[in-house]
Amino acid sequence: MIKIVDYGLGNIQAFVNVYRRLHIPVEVAKCAEDLVGASKIILPGVGAFDHAMERLEASGMRPMLDDLVRRQKVPVLGICVGMQILADSSEEGVLPGLGWVSGTVRSFESVPGLENLALPHMGWNDVQATTDSALFAGLEEESRFYFLHSFFFECLAASDAAATSVYGLNFSCAVRNDNVFGVQFHPEKSHHFGVRLLKNFAEL
């Protein structure tokens, strides 16, 4: 059963609607008990890094998520800020992230030469898969997704970058380490491209 983590951030219903249209069973998890039986986990999020970590901790689901993802190796997909909190830390805040994918979330403005880049990066942009990840099956060419962010994930290991996009620089817009996946863009707002990606995740 796919469980969508509802800790007060992100458009949970949009993901539920996509999977119901695909006739794929899905449930919303609002507490640790709701995560029991998860075969896949979606971790959405919007807003600031520290606020997301605070809300996740306050939900009481953090220990269960750590167990499911790290010990039981249940596949998880972090989306937008849900992807960013997979990292070790962020320039946006002071709290540690989940540390499920080694890296740091950086501001575009912190990159030399990008101080005047218009932020946030908002709208449609091309995405290029860098690996043969099943998450991007059927999306290898001319795939476009909807973005809304001012920070990007800088992977410690280049092999963890699953896809890239270009906005001022070539940045990792998707990450993957073992059973942990993350995408910076919003598949739930990306029409048939996003539907295909969410279906791919369900079929991993």
Image (cartoon, grey):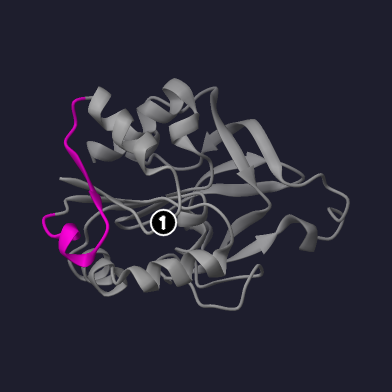
Amino acid identity at mark 1:
Gly
Q: Determine whether the residue tagged by mark 1 lies in a helix, strand or loop.
A: loop
* Residue 137 seen in this snapshot: no
- Name the image quarter holding residue 35: bottom left
Q: Residue at x 32, y 58 (%)?
A: 178
Quadrant location of the N terminus in the rendered image: top left
* Residue 24 seen in this snapshot: yes
Q: Nearer the viewer, residue 192 or 174?
A: 192
Badge 1 density bin: few <14, some 14–19, many ≥20, Cα 10 Å: some
Quadrant location of the C terminus in the rendered image: top left
Q: Which residue is disc 1 drawn over?
A: 8
- The range drawn in magenta is 23-37
- Across and down, in percent, residue 172 comes to 58, 50
Q: Nearer the viewer, residue 146 or 144?
A: 146
- Name the image quarter holding residue 139: top left
- Across and down, in percent, residue 201 comes to 30, 39
Q: Residue at x 26, y 53 (%)?
A: 75
- Across and down, in percent, residue 53 comes to 47, 69
The answer to whether residue 174 is above or below residue 122 is below
| Residue 36 forms part of the magenta stretch | yes
Q: Residue at x 36, y 27 (%)?
A: 196
The answer to whether residue 141 is above or below residue 160 is above
The answer to whether residue 28 is above or below residue 129 is below
| Residue 80 forms part of the magenta stretch | no
Q: Nearer the viewer, residue 7 or 42?
A: 7
The number of numbered discs placed on residues in the rendered structure image is: 1
The answer to whether residue 103 is above or below residue 203 is below
